Image: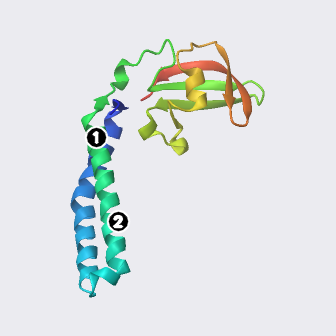
Amino acid sequence: MAIKYFTKEGLENLKEELNELKTKGRADMARRISEAREKGDLSENAEYDAAKEAQGLLEMKIARLEGDLGNARLLDESKVDTSKVMILSRVKVLNVKMKREFSYMIVSDNEADVKQGKISSETPIAKGLLGKKVGDVVDVVVPRGTFTFEILEISNGGS
């Protein structure tokens, strides 16, 4: 499995989700299976089949999260180099054509949240900005065309 990078907050969220699934999720699933089993002949019990399938999906998700946790590396936001755009950088850009400023924090894929301005390092915009410096003008190809961004500011993601 590949190494996954997390902020302190993201790692805590992963641990909480995993704990929730292993405790409440498994307990709820056992209850569903038990209730379905009580309804009679298992060979013709669609509710039982659905509960067993859901249980399998739950266990797959738990295994995936355990794998992510086992390969997790904590990123120290205080040590982010602000001379260039990196994962955990907060970057303020000017969309040259639209004459509008945008601010993005570049995070690992599992922590992306567009509503909070956190974009995955795997997105075309992030890939186009990574490694660039203040003052650089970058053409970024996205599905809707090409955006030209001027990098105005790079800061620590926590600031």
Q: Which mark is on residue 54?
A: 2
Q: Which residue is mark 1?
A: 67
The image shows a total of numbered marks equal to 2
Secondary element at tag 2 = helix
- Kind of residue sitting beneath label 1: Gly
Q: Which mark is on residue 18?
A: none
Q: Residue furthest bottom?
A: 40
Label 1 crowd (10 A; few <14 / some 14-19 / many >=20): some
Label 2 crowd (10 A; few <14 / some 14-19 / many >=20): some
- Kind of residue sitting beneath label 2: Ala
What separation in Å lies between label 1 and label 2 (alpha carbons)? 20 Å
The chosen color scheme is rainbow
Quadrant (top left, top right, bottom left, bottom right) of the N terminus? top left
Q: Is residue 90 above or below residue 57?
A: above
Task: Give the mark, 1 or 2, whose residue is nearer the N terminus.
Answer: 2
x, y percent for residue 159: 44, 28
Q: Is residue 53 above or below residue 144?
A: below
Q: Residue furthest front?
A: 43
| Residue drawn at 73 percent across, 37 percent down | 144
x, y percent for residue 53: 34, 66
| Residue drawn at 55 percent across, 31 percent down | 104
x, y percent for residue 113: 49, 42
